Image: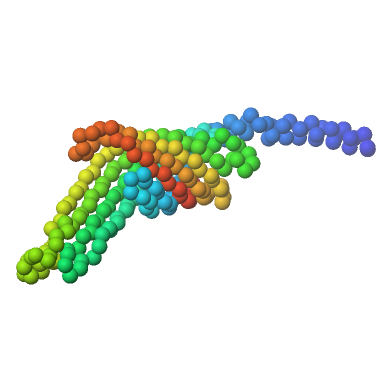
Amino acid sequence: MLKRAFLSGLMLLGVLLPLAAQETNPLQNMGAAQSEVSNRLGVAVGVLAATSDGSSALLSAMYTRSILQGVEMELSFQHSALSRTFGDPPTQNSLPDYSIYFRNYSTIDGTVLLAPFSTGFLSGFRFGAGATFQFREQGSVRTVPVSLRLLPDSLAVVLRTYPPSSYTYSNGLVFGGHLKIDYVIPLSKMVDIGVRIQGHVLLLRLTGDDSVKVFADATGSASIFLRVGF
């Protein structure tokens, strides 16, 4: 009976070992991972810093598609707006001297993201680069200070109510490139959160009233994002 049990055990082991080897074949698992394609939608909030006029809030939406193991394609839309007021309030002898400035940046990025590390803490890092199109809109209003000491009282009242002003406005589409660094933390198979640092360099003016086509500006930003797979 012991001999029969031993032979039965050998036969069972002979059946299970090929199955176990098939399950743990790393090449097969890698091929399956590469053939898996996933889609993710995400939103992000952050802060954008511009070289010309300071920092402002940044809102982003993104669509990501995994095409290979460790390779993703991303299309994102980002918007940042800023408005500021400078100057002095009116006094008894002068008009108000102030200026109002605003700008809006609407940005579309096409990015290739790579995840070079597959295990451990480093597996959360992704590095990306791509092309950028940014629509810029900005303008300002400035009062012209005028002394009221030598003006008749009636004219002074009018100028206090309707001070003379100068206006500027411009918009245009510019082209450039960007770099992104992400660290992603999976919450589940379909949901993850992460931190993104990115930099944009704008190089070429495509539309706008300015005759100068070579455009040079840069922005940097940091944001936190949430993505959901489907």
Report x, y in % for residue 75.
40, 40
Q: Quadrant of the N terminus?
A: top right
Res 146 quadrant in image: bottom left
Report x, y in % for residue 83.
29, 55
Drawn side of residue 176 relative to residue 223, left or right: left
Drawn side of residue 19 relative to residue 168, left or right: right
Q: Can residue 230 be seen from the camera position used here?
A: no
Res 141 quadrant in image: bottom left
Drawn side of residue 122 relative to residue 9, left or right: left
- The answer to whether residue 88 is above or below residue 174 is below
Drawn side of residue 43 relative to residue 155, left or right: right
Q: Residue at x 56, y 48 (%)?
A: 185
Q: Residue at x 56, y 51 (%)?
A: 187
Q: Residue at x 21, y 37 (%)?
A: 210
Q: Can residue 187 be seen from the camera position used here?
A: yes
Q: Residue at x 36, y 44 (%)?
A: 51
Res 162 quadrant in image: bottom left
- The answer to whether residue 20 is above or below residue 101 is above
Report x, y in % for residue 184.
54, 45
Q: Along the line of sight, which residue is nearer the eye, 112 or 157?
A: 157
Q: Along the line of sight, which residue is nearer the eye, 128 or 24?
A: 128
Report x, y in % for residue 199.
42, 41
Q: Along the line of sight, which residue is nearer the eye, 175 or 67?
A: 175
